[in-house]
Amino acid sequence: MSEEDIFSAFATHERWIGEAMKEARLAADKGEVPVGAIIVRDAQVIGRGHNQVESLRDPTAHAEILAIGSASGHGENWRLEDATLYVTLEPCTMCCGAILLARVRSVVFGAADQRAGAVVSTGRLLDGNPYRQHIEVVGGISAGDCGAILSDFFQSRRD
Amino acid sequence: MSEEDIFSAFATHERWIGEAMKEARLAADKGEVPVGAIIVRDAQVIGRGHNQVESLRDPTAHAEILAIGSASGHGENWRLEDATLYVTLEPCTMCCGAILLARVRSVVFGAADQRAGAVVSTGRLLDGNPYRQHIEVVGGISAGDCGAILSDFFQSRRD
């Protein structure tokens, strides 16, 4: 990859993480912990989701799960082999498992989750996984902005 | 625990795994890989689910996820702290994560899943988890019958 290609990939990642942040803000508007995700294939958004654990009264209703569900219903089959998941926060154990099952090609996340992130923070569940899949991972894209959406939300709840 | 209590607990587990097997058979009837799950609280079934990945075109539509979703909508809040998940096959990475997020108290499974099971076979994701939860796990209840539902299904697809 040339330097130019690397900068171009980075700009693309920032743009899509920006779309995922819009989803996170929708979660905040509902009083949900603000995490958002989108699925992109061929430069098109094919799935979107934001955390809705409280609204749907369902602990599995994380942004990534809802985005994967909506993207998988989009095409002819549910496999997302050529797709990238963009998410504002590092995925947890459940969402790493869902990423593997959906056969997502690559994952780009914003802020790390020291408490429950399972990509790099508390485990490395996408590496050497039981399905023997290779998943490209990029972390830290617009991490400050993604983290600020969360910290602003928790600050406003404390006030 | 007295010997009598142990036998009584075992009989209870077998009974509920039998209910989960009914769900697995519903999956088989739809041409889905036959895995079934139920959630039990206070000796009542409060959630049921069977694998519907193909029908719903959603790789996250595992029996456990659907059972947790249905049980969580059942009560006043989505937490399943006093509940037990019974499932015919050892849960995968995604479902272990969902079990932790749902705060299920205990998990009873039938057959082990050498390929993708994440409770004992390819990992031990419920032990020493990032959420510091203690989850009781019992495996191998009616394992032969639970496994036979799966092997019969794959055999009939090959024929």
Image: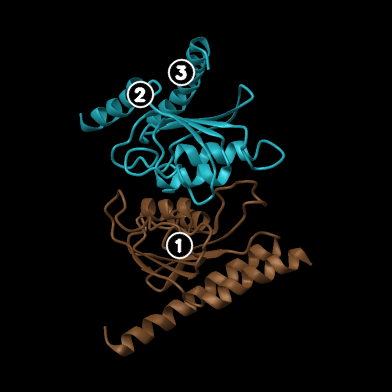
Chain colours: A brown, B cyan
Picture quadrant of residue A123:
bottom left
Q: CA distance from mark 1 to mark 3?
A: 38 Å
Residue lying farthest to the bottom in this orientation: A4
Q: Is residue A15 above or below residue A91?
A: below
Nearest to viewer (mark 1 / mark 2): 1
Q: Which residue is mark 1?
A: A121
Q: Which residue is mark 3?
A: B14
Q: CA distance from mark 2 to mark 3?
A: 10 Å
Q: Share a chain, discs 2 and 3?
A: yes
Q: Position of residue A114 (x, y in %)?
A: 51, 63
Q: Residue at x 44, y 47 (%)?
A: B94
The chain to which mark 3 is attached is B
The reply, left or right, for residue B136 in relation to residue A54 is left
Circle 3 residues within 10 Å: few <14, some 14–19, many ≥20? some
Circle 2 residues within 10 Å: few <14, some 14–19, many ≥20? some
The chain to which mark 1 is attached is A
Q: Amino acid at mark 3?
A: Glu
Q: Position of residue B5 (x, y in %)?
A: 53, 13
Front residue of A48/B109: it is: B109
Residue lying farthest to the right in this orientation: A159
Front residue of A131/B48: it is: A131
Q: Share a chain, discs 1 and 3?
A: no
The first of marks 2 and 3 along the sequence is: 3
Q: Is residue A21 above or below residue B113?
A: below
